[in-house]
């Protein structure tokens, strides 16, 4: 079997226009796959220089394969099972700024560089006041980026055409806003080091650098350990950097304050490549859509499925009763609480169901049920309130899901003898133990809904919620989960 490198496999050559902080599975399966497709289908013609954001990483592995690797996408697309393999060739080289700081900083001097993309984990976008301007490099990602931006400002004497478009992919809401604030903090921290150039640099960054908030969405399991021998045999290369992900992808890029949507689309023409990349005035409605229509159903389907004897999300979707419950929650309740066009919401919701139904991933419902109460508070409770406000009644499916979570936290065994082992903060576990010990579902409902350490309010004040939760708890106790679900579907 051949080694994978530019001597054994074809590799395109394009100008280095993108600096990418991060070499992990997600960026290679998501961003670099998108850039590869943009190169193939448009005149984007760009390659990526990968920068390792921490001291230890994978740049030596990437360089050992000359930046080449395969992406294996699996899932359902338009109802059909898909399993593809694509060789990605848009990475030109990879640098470790801790051992190659001069090469890293020299990236600022390359006139073609236009974009900075990152995924340095949620903790990566943080201001560390211990970073010094003279560090080689600064330990934090925003510190390294500020050093690079100042070098570029100085090299090109404040040329307004040499600002950078910065698109962080860290999984925090308004990631670009947080990153921009960190950069300003470093500019202030290091203003004495910048001397007379401080004000001019700050003005250049404000006017001619464009920091976007983004939302990314693709499940990336990573290196396919179980299938790697089969994949290597199929591709005929000893690729040790294969990365596996789902076929679905979505990248929402919020336009920066100082650039129009049309201008950003012209520079980053992902839409022309037929990719699911949206450049929008705000990422907020898409963030709400993802949390509501992807994470929201996950949170309530899991206890309903598990207590019905179903262990895999895919099997829950295809179950004659639980599948209808998921549909009810998704299309009849949660979708009604959002503010995007209904056609757009239906398409996204249908995509979510396809993702849940992925034939290649055995997604255990128990893996979703850790810390179910806090998840319900952020993912489903807003929908309960909005639905009540808009419809004048409580959403039956969502409230039933809360009752299912409360029942799951009772513990015990399922009908098939499997032990029920809930997992949450000790104080929540103790609360549920004490409430269920009363044997009174009215006290259980009132006690859970009154727990302000969970909800940050007393949910007993929501009209009708306490009585409906009690009613659902009684049905589950008396009829069993599946029969109780059927009563919800009849309404």
Image (cartoon, helix red, strand yellow):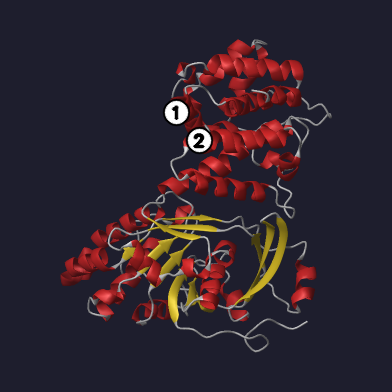
Compared with residue 142, is residue 297 higher up or lower down, i.e. above or below? above
Q: Residues within 10 Å of mark 2 (few under 14, many from 20)?
A: some
- Residue at which label 1 appears: 390
Q: Secondary structure at mark 1?
A: helix
Left or right: 333 with respect to 235?
left
- Residue at which label 2 appears: 336
User: Which residue is located at x 66 percent, y 24 percent?
Assistant: 488
Along the line of sight, which residue is nearer the eye, 104 or 303?
A: 303
Which residue reaches farthest front? Answer: 343
Q: Position of residue 353 (x, y in %)?
A: 64, 46
Determine which quarter of the picture holds residue 229: bottom right
Q: Position of residue 143 (x, y in %)?
A: 36, 63
Callout 2–callout 1 Cβ contact below 8 Å: yes
Quarter placement of the N terminus: bottom right
Which residue reaches farthest bottom? Answer: 7
Does residue 190 appear in the picture of this structure?
A: no
Q: Position of residue 114 (x, y in %)?
A: 38, 74
Q: Residues within 10 Å of mark 1 (few under 14, many from 20)?
A: few
Quarter placement of the C terminus: top right
């Amino acid at each position: 079997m051949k080694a994978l490198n530019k001597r054994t496999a074809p590799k395109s050559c394009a100008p280095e226009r993108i600096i990418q902080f991060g070499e992990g599975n997600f960026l290679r399966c998501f961003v670099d796959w998108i850039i590869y497709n943009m190169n193939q289908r448009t005149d984007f013609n760009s390659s990526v220089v990968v920068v390792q954001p921490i001291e230890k990483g994978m740049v030596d592995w990437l360089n050992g394969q000359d930046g080449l690797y395969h992406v294996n996408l699996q899932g359902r697309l338009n109802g059909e099972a898909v399993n593809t393999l694509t060789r990605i060739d848009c990475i030109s080289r990879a640098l470790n700024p801790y051992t190659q700081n001069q090469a890293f900083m020299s990236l600022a001097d390359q006139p073609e560089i236009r974009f900075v993309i990152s995924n340095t984990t949620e903790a990566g976008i943080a201001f560390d006041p211990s970073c010094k301007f003279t560090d080689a490099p600064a330990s934090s990602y925003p510190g390294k980026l500020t050093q690079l931006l100042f070098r570029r400002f100085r090299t090109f004497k404040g040329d307004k055409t040499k600002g950078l478009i910065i698109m962080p992919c860290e999984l925090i809401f308004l990631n670009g806003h947080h990153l921009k604030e960190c950069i300003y903090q470093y500019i202030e921290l290091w203003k004495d080091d910048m001397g007379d150039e401080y004000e001019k640099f700050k003005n250049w960054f404000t006017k001619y650098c464009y920091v976007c908030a983004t939302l990314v969405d693709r499940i990336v399991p990573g290196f396919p350990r179980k299938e790697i021998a089969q994949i290597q045999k199929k591709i005929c290369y000893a690729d040790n950097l294969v990365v596996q992900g789902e076929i679905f992808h979505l990248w929402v890029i919020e336009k920066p304050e100082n650039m129009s949507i049309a201008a950003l689309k012209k520079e980053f023409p992902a839409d022309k490549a037929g990719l699911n990349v949206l450049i929008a005035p705000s990422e907020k409605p898409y963030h709400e859509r993802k949390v509501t229509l992807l994470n929201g159903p996950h949170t309530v389907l899991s206890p309903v499925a598990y207590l019905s004897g179903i262990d895999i999300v895919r099997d829950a979707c295809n179950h004659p009763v639980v599948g209808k419950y998921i549909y009810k929650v998704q299309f009849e309740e949660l979708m009604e609480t959002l503010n995007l066009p209904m056609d757009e919401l239906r398409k996204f919701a249908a995509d979510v169901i396809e993702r849940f139904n992925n034939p290649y991933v055995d997604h255990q419902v128990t893996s979703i049920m850790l810390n179910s109460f806090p998840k319900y508070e952020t993912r489903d409770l807003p929908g309960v309130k909005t639905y009540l406000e808009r419809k004048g009644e409580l959403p039956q499916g969502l409230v039933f899901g809360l009752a299912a979570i409360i029942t799951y936290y009772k513990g015990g065994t399922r009908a098939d003898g499997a032990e029920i082992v809930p997992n949450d903060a000790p104080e929540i576990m103790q609360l549920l133990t004490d409430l269920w010990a009363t044997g009174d579902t009215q006290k259980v409902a009132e006690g859970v809904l009154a727990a302000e350490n969970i909800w940050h309010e007393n949910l007993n004040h929501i009209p009708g919620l306490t009585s409906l939760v009690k009613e659902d708890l009684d049905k589950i106790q008396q009829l069993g989960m599946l029969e109780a679900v059927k009563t919800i579907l009849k309404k």
